[in-house]
Image (tube, helix red, strand yellow):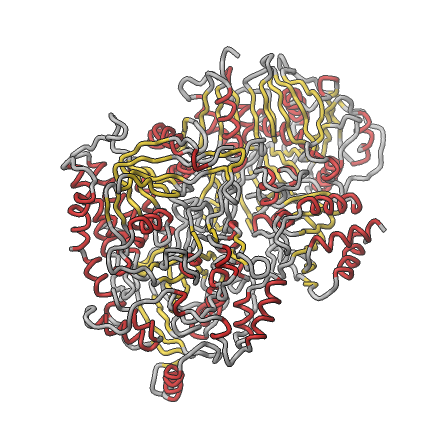
Amino acid sequence: MENPAHVERQVLPVDIACVGFGPATGGFLSTLSRALADGDPAFESRAVPGMPLQVVCYERADDISFGVSGVATRAHGIRESFPDLDPAQIPMAHPVGHEKLVYLLDPLGTSRRSATLRGLDRTLRALRRILPLHDEALELPWIPGFMRKENGLLLSLGQFNAWVGAQLMGSGQVQVWPGMPVSEPLLEEGGVAGVRLVDQGLDAAGKPESGYMPGMDIRAALTVIGDGPVGAVGQRLDEHFGLPEGNLQRDWAVGMKMVVDLPEACVLPAGTVLHTIGYPEPEIFGFLYVYPNNTASLGIFLPSWLHSPVRASYRYLQHWMQHPYVWQHLDGGTMRSWGAKTLQESGRRGEPHLVGDGYARIGEGSGSTNVLTGSGVDEAWTTGTLLAEGVLELLAQKRPFTRENLEAAYVQRRRQSWVEKEGRVAEHARDGFQLGFVRGLLGMGLAGLTRGRLHLGGRPRRAREHVPTLAEYYRGRIPAAEIESIRETCASSGTPLHEALMERAGWPPVRYDGKLLVSHQDALLLGGKVQAPPGYANHVIFLDPSLCEGCQQRLCVGVCSGQAITPGDGCGVPQFDREKCVHCGACLWSCTQAREGDPERGNIAFRAGAGGLHSAEN
Amino acid sequence: MERILYLTHTEADGGLSKVALETLTSAVELSRQLSGSTLRLALWGGAIQTAADAVAGCGAEETLGVTGEEFADSRYASDAAAAEALVRAADATFVIAPASARLARTLPGVALRVGGRIDSHVVGMGAAGEGVQIQRWYYRQRMLATMTRSQRPWFVLVDPGLFETWNGEAGSATPRLVEVDLPTPYDRTRVVGIEAAKSQAQTIRPDADLLFVAGAGWTKKQADGQTHVKDAEELILGFLDSAQASLGGSKSMVEQSAEGEDVLSFMSHLNQVGQTGSTPRHAKGLATCCHGEEPHVVGWRFIHERRAINTDPNCGWAQSKADVLYVADAFALTAKVNELLRG
Amino acid sequence: MSQGFHLVVCGSIVPDPLQTLEPIQGAEGPALKNEMMLPAVLDPWAGHALYEAAHLAAATPDSKVWLVSLGPRAKLQQLMMTIAPKAAFELVALDGPAGGFTEAWETAEALAECIKTIPGLDRSRLLLFGGCASASRDAGVTMQMVGERLEISDQFLAVDELTPQENGTIRILERIEAGRYQVSECAGPPLVAAWATGRLPEPPNNAQLGMQNMRSIMPALQKAQPARVGAEGVEFLEVEVPKQRRNTRVVEDASVDEMAREIVEWIRK
């Protein structure tokens, strides 16, 4: 069998190749395909003379509807693209109705709260007669304007993507191919000349098998990268070209969510938006959006700046759901779907080089997410539409997709857009969380109210710079020797360490009801319908085994949304089970071991891979 | 008033298969329930007298038959011609047939020829006023419908394992032989023979009391970080041998086999149970090292008593689906079970 | 062989088997809850038929594969993006419902009438392929009725292997009871083969093949004829998901010996 590195590959020439089908590429292709369908001017393909412009998009997931996000969006950009948008056309979509911001107290006394916060909680409880405090929660009387989504839309990203995709493919102008992961950009002469699809017919270790088919090289005049926060192509470009001076990508979060059939007795009307702070850990934000037909999208965000090595997102999600304020709406409900994804929370500060010769970057991976407004889909969509406008301009002028031309046609548009202006306001909004939860909230408020002129806190830190070891974290609560003993017990029984430690620290066991409170694996299988097709190599690689062997935190194991990463034997390299991976990418940014020669990156490579979630409702 | 026709082919030995006798029970029962209905029997095959005599005591008004060398083999052209002739001769409105491989292939075309409609995967029949209602599966045993229909003749293929085997008294029957208008040529297809499955035949025992379901966990790395596929093979074959069990595999297990990974050499798609495989019927089932979700658990639908071995107490195959879950290493436990079974 | 095969594969969408299915009463009878939202895949056994057909066509000069699909146009369009890179075929689309509660008889009629109008199809060279049952209606009767309507009297169900012989005959393995195969030899086309899993793994995605297929797929979708398919004459009295929850006794703290003894007792009972 030939070595994949030296094998001859088929070449497919196209004009524009897009990587990843999410809202950004949706916006790009919607704008582009409309102009192409218009036919004036008509653009002939240079890649395939005599044919119309060849525009293709390769999506990693097995279906274009397998994206993850419960979306509450102001939908500025989306509505600009679809002025007559009727939410009823899109399954699960609904206009935003009543919005609430809720501070959750700790009903169990187990969350890790600072003295300040405990004092605040005591004060709130003391004033319960005069404050709107009920069910261990305070509904804040006012939501800052920058957080509100008035006149906006609630969406299921999966269904929105499916709706956009159906229209795109119906136009016949562009092709969106799901189930086709892109492994890397074709880096040539200081620019990008297209992309390479992943090899098929490999074993888990990447060794060719009988059905080996080398990934095809798709050569394109323009490569549009919209592969999200942890996409393989975006990562490779960042490694190759670096980030612009002063930019950093150190703030991340994993969002874990469910779509739930609410109990019949639930009184929340469609359009309701609840945002929570304060519980299960103060820094873990929660959301609950009510869709039509008594269903809801709900979940939590577990941020990279959580000053805890315990990263059991699923367990935290279950405790959040069972908070009396939330549970009153959920008790008796049924899980319909489940999923998780990484959010690139550095936003504008994490912006990479947006263009270069032959390529442009859009969407979340291009730093468009706004962490102050808690919004990313509309921003991503808009970056796509801005690029499409620029691309159409260059096509009309018959100018090539050089860095210079793309700077003028796309980057300039982006700099003048609301995405940029609001992104700048949000740039330092969450820095205060480096100093603690209360200062984090104050910092956000300050940044929001002063339009970004004032903020609190310093530079974001890398995971290894602020995440304590388990022994440090539990000092005074669980003796180090007991932690080791629990670790050994968990290793031998194959049960999750972080959950065991949480229980030892006072979090009660979760009583499964078989409907909404189910085991992590049942959430994976019943909710996420996770699976991986055979014939692809493992996409999570532990690069330097010696670093893993010496690692105390092992955040990759605890944070893994699908329990796909397990401790391995003894203290060796963790094991990865591709069939459980939901491709959230949390392992990538959670690793506390610095890669040799590249302190910004950890010891885990998160490459392009097939499979993952098979739910269309997330 | 329904004119019920029980229709089946005979086996090579001239008798009737188990599913044919089960289906006869259902036909007799239905005719009893439906006042004013009539029941006829129709048999075809190389020889039919033995079968006709065996079921002579079922109370049918008449037995019709098609017999001859040209009807011995399971072949669509001749089978469809025979079945069509029998249905027409009986002037049937409701045709009940066992879901044998031969009838499943033949009957739909026959229904079309005589202007009827057909339902398969039928699991229940009963009187509804003067008419009939049936229960049948949809979506691979994931939904059960109770339905009736206006078109006649109405053909139903009854699933195996649902009714008692008919064990009434034998007698002496004189079938009315029906002429068949065979197409020319009727024998473009020639049956060459019967082949055992390429996987080891002894691992598939449809009549076994016990189904052993092997999950993908058998081929995964074990606690020592290594795979032990050879050990797994020995343990499983040893168990099948000593327990006389039938072998099923989860979807991920047989797909591994298809992809040529470290696999159990005797596992193939024929062993697959569940949503995209079969839904076998056995009195008992033992699932080992399976993980899976609802669609694959469908493979257990018709297993009466179910037990599971898994290291995960929350295993989706077991919780709420098995009667007993043993939280244990399947390698060690199966080895011990084999030892005790042999002893 | 002087002439290749004309391979017509009948196959359409079914809900991704991993999805949770729930019946509801729709305006025209039972349907699936959120049917249009459920991700769809090519019916698995029809998929095997398609891959076998493409493989056979590639190995037999002067052969061609048509995929005849009856389903909602928008869903078919989505499906094509997942199967076009896997096999070379020309799509013939019919725009109509593909749910499980439609009548096999009506579906067969729509498919057969459509096949009769395929330009250039030589029915004397026809190998009519499909799945041995769908994952939706799950009846296993449609292909035989399509075959009857096309006057094909050599039919095979649950096929795992189909091999053209040097003498022009075709050797076929059908699954029968007890895990065995019936081996038959057919004089040649036309024939109907309703496939089980076959012998081929799912082909890899070939981007170039996908692009080539799409050139004919998009026009085929645009000119898809509406097909009125329902369940005339059928009255569904009830459709339910069978209950199958059990109280599971978890044996966790017993020794391996104790567990083994209990299991053996149970087996011998």
| Most foreground residue, C119 or B230 | B230
Which residue of the protein is positioned furthest toward the left in this rendering?
Answer: A397
| Most foreground residue, A553 or B33 | A553
Residue drawn at 63 percent across, 15 percent down: B188
B81 left or right, relative to C10: right
Residue A168, compared with residue A93, is above or below; it is above
Quarter of the rendering containing residue C214 = top left
Residue drawn at 74 percent across, 49 percent down: B283
Quarter of the rendering containing residue A504 = bottom right
Which residue of the protein is positioned furthest toward the front in this rendering?
Answer: A597
Residue drawn at 67 percent across, 33 percent down: B3
Residue drawn at 48 percent across, 50 percent down: C25
Residue C11, compared with residue A319, is above or below; it is above
B124 left or right, relative to A477: right
Number of numbered discs on residues: 0
The location of residue A130, given as percent across then percent down, is 34, 87
Q: Is residue A143 visible?
A: no
| Most foreground residue, A397 or A292 | A397
C188 left or right, relative to B235: left
- Check the picture and name the quadrant holding the C terminus of chain A: bottom left
Residue A8, compared with residue A477, is above or below; it is above
